[in-house]
Each structure stands twice: as C-alpha cells, then as structure tokens.
Image (tube, grey):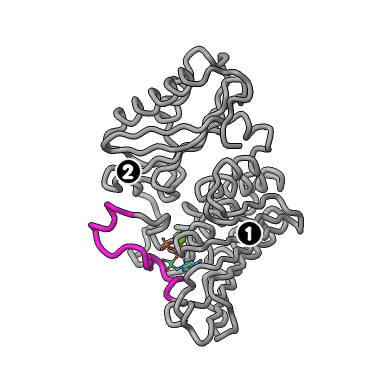
Amino acid sequence: MGERRMAEIHELSEILANQIAAGEVIERPGSVVKELVENALDAHATQIDVLVEEAGVKSIRVIDNGDGIPGNQVARAFLRHATSKINSRQDLFRVQSLGFRGEALPSIASVADVVLQTATADAEQGAKIHYQGGKIIEETGTNARQGTDITVSDLFFNTPARLKYLKSQATELSQIVDVINRLAMSYPNVAFHLVHNGKELLQTAGNGNLQQVIASVYGVQQARKMLSVSAHDNDFEINGFISLPELTRANRSYISILINGRFVKNYNLSKAIVKGYGSKLMVGRFPIAILQIKMDPLLVDVNVHPQKHEVRLSKETQLMSLIEEMVVQRFVNENLIPNAYENY
Ligand code: ADP
Ligand code: MG
C-alpha cells in the first residue's frame, strides 16, 4: 500500500473547470479566432473585422455588427454552459447555430485578458466587461454602436505549458488565415476583413458571390479554373465549385465541405469528390473544392467533438454517391475547352 492518500472528492472551482475546458476548445490563437467569428456569425453579423497582432498571441480583436448582447446578460455570457442558442434536448438534435455548448467565452476568458463591448439595437447604452484569467475585473456601461467588439490579449498568459506548445508565428498565423478563409467561403454574404500587424490579408465584399470570395482566397487565376457544381435529391442540396483537373494540390486540405453552414472534416465526402474525377487527376494530386451542402439538421449530429469539426451523418453513403455522380456529370458536360468557364 502506498503512503499517499487521495484527497477528498470536491468540486473544481469555476475558473479551474474553465481552464480545463479551454484545453479542449482553445488550443491555439486560431481556435480563439474561430470561436469569436462563429459567435459573430450566430449573431447575424454582415460585417466582421478581425484584427490580429503577433499571430494572435499578443491580441485578437473581432468586431461585428450583429445583434449584440443585452446589457443585463453580458456577465452571463461568460458563465460555463451558458448559451442563448439551445434550450432543450430537442434543440440539440436540430442545431442551426455554429455554437451551442456555451464554452467558448468562459474558456477564453480563463486563459487570457478579455474586454468585450456590446450593444443591442434598442439599448440606450452598451455594456463593457473585462475579464482576466477567469476573474471579472470590471463591468460598466459604455457608448457602443450595435454589435460586439471583443479583444482577447495575452492568450495563455497563465498557462505557460500552452504558450510553450505554440508553433512559430508563421504557423499560428497560417492557421488563423485558414480559419478566416474557410468562414469567408462559407458565408459569401458576410463581408470579412482580416488584418495582421496592420497589414490586410483578406477582404471580401459580402455580396453573396462565392466565386469572388474564392478569387480573394486562392487568387483570380485559380478562381477562373473553378467550375460551378450543383446537385440535389430528396435529402440533400449541394452547391459549390470544383477545380479543373489541371488545378490540383498535393493534399486534401483544399477540399472544403460545409454542412448547413458549418465547415466539417469528413474524409468520406472528400473521397467522393476525388473519386468523381476518376483518372483525370494525377496520382497523389487533389482538387480544390468547396461544397455547400444543405440538409435537414436531424440528419447530422454535430455534438461529436468539442471543436465541432467532426460530424456524424445519417445517409452518408447516399450523400457520397450524390457527390461522386455530380462531379462525374460535371466533367461529362464540361468539354474541357479552355474558357468554358462561365460567370466569371
Ligand atoms: P455558444 O456560442 O456556444 O452559445 P459562447 O461562450 O461562445 O457559447 O457564447 C456565449 C453566449 O454569448 C452566446 O450564446 C451568445 O448569446 C453570446 N455571444 C457571444 N458572442 C456574441 C456576439 N459576437 N454577438 C452576440 N452575442 C454573442
Ligand atoms: Mg460560441
């Protein structure tokens, strides 16, 4: 028998519980950006500015023109498992919003310095709240325009192991860019603006034109080599763009799949795209693609992973066939004469 006795069972403090959750939800600056921008999108923002300093380690500021948070609920937004997005078990099975776990704000606030300013359309004045390492520092009224403006600085200042685990600034920045690129392509109706150390990295118009967003993300030359695709059956509706076989990449990560507006990682669906190209692709090469797939939320379970990248799909095989057939058909119709690229 060992000498050490176990301590008594006790509940973790709120701050400690939040820091543990942060370990899952907030891995790196890119995850903070993702969570904050998703909150802005859930709040129906049409304009989202993301201002980043030193790859997000120094600060990340996200400004949106969305619904804002009512002044009397601002502190509640920072409570663990507090959300305005779902109520019941039923809601969980038909989640429409990007968030629903109520973990992002408390997690971020437990491992950084956070200042949030917000106002709703009908509020006489806005609210401002300041958290540091999970502790509330100040809550006041403020003159804010409608929307939310949140600044996260000194990320992981109180969790040195996390800080040490971060990669080079170039790598962390590329993750942030990746997050914004994907969200911009997912929401062509939203104007995105990404600035790093004062330098503009992405700007989209928010006019709903996906091909224009693709041009902003991948370049105009590339966008000209993308073909529009669409398909539907009783359960699924697909719209998007796939690259000509001549425009390829060395890995699958340029295949973006969105299910009901949520970017997901699904190997089987990207495999279906690749399969549709058949022998048109050289071995070891993969297309660029972006597919928006709409389906009844009941067919998709997003509650698989804290970061909600993975989803479980009912009728996945049916969807795979629909995708593969769509790609096959697109190339049957496309006679591959250069300049057959419509609408660009
Ligand atoms: P979740 O997004 O899972 O609900 P969060 O911790 O990310 O959890 O946010 C908590 C709550 O704070 C949200 O449910 C929402 O009501 C509010 N909120 C957060 N960010 C914004 C924002 N940018 N605009 C409006 N409301 C927001
Ligand atoms: Mg959220």
User: Along the line of sight, which residue is nearer the eye, 179 or 276?
Assistant: 276
Q: How many marks?
A: 2
Q: Is mark 1 within 8 Å of ligand 1?
A: no
Could you say where residue 221 lies in the image, as x and y percent from the top left? 68, 32
- Residues marked 2 and 1 touching at CB (< 8 Å): no
Judge whether residue 161 can be spotted in this image.
Answer: no
- Residues in magenta, as a range: 76-95
The residue located at (44%, 38%) in the rendering is 239
Question: Dot 1 corresponds to which residue?
Answer: 50
Quadrant position of residue 323: top left
Judge whether residue 323 can be spotted in this image.
Answer: yes
Could you say where residue 229 lies in the image, as x and y percent from the top left? 46, 32
Quadrant position of residue 313: top left
* Horizontal relation, residue 261 to residue 181: left or right: left
Element at label 1? strand
* Horizontal relation, residue 88 to residue 105: left or right: left
Element at label 2? strand
Residue type pointed to by label 1: Val
Q: Say the numbered circle drawn on residue 295.
A: 2
Q: Say the numbered circle drawn on residue 243.
A: none
- Name the magenta segment's main secondary structure: loop
